[in-house]
Image (cartoon, grey):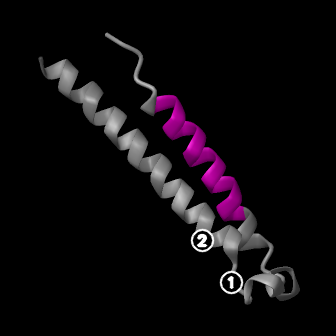
Amino acid sequence: MQLDIRLPMGLLFALEGLIILLYGLTHSNPTLYAKSDYININLWWGLVITVFGLFLLLMAWNKMRYEKMK
């Protein structure tokens, strides 16, 4: 069995994405996002990074499940 890098990377991305997502949800000061045309960049990028991390975790989980069936 080889080391699957998707598991630790998925955990890292999911955790970091959740931190950024929560920051975007709790700090919705309009003047903070004035330079970005009032788009809450932390909220959207936190969501993207979290989804990517969950995708990596899903791929690692599927691989572990497939290897147990062999």
Disc 1: CA contacts within 10 A as few (<14), some (14-19) or many (>=20): some
Residue at 70%, 68% in the rendered image: 42
Q: Residue furthest right?
A: 31
- Tag 2's secondary structure? helix
What is the spatial separation of the Cα atoms under label 1 and label 2, in whole angstroms?
9 Å
Where does residue 65 sit, x and y in percent of width and height? 23, 28
Left or right: residue 9 compared with residue 59: right
Where does residue 52 sit, x and y in percent of width and height? 47, 52
Magenta region, mostly helix, strand or loop?
helix
Q: Quadrant of the C terminus?
A: top left
Q: Nearer the viewer, residue 41 or 60?
A: 41
The amino acid type of the residue labelled 1 equals Ile
Region rendered in magenta: 7-22
Q: Report which residue position mark 1 lands on.
A: 39
Which label's residue is closer to the chain start, 1 or 2? Answer: 1
Left or right: residue 37 compared with residue 47: right
Residue at 53%, 35% in the rendered image: 9
Task: Answer whether residue 21 is magenta in the image.
Answer: yes
Residue at 52%, 30% in the rendered image: 8
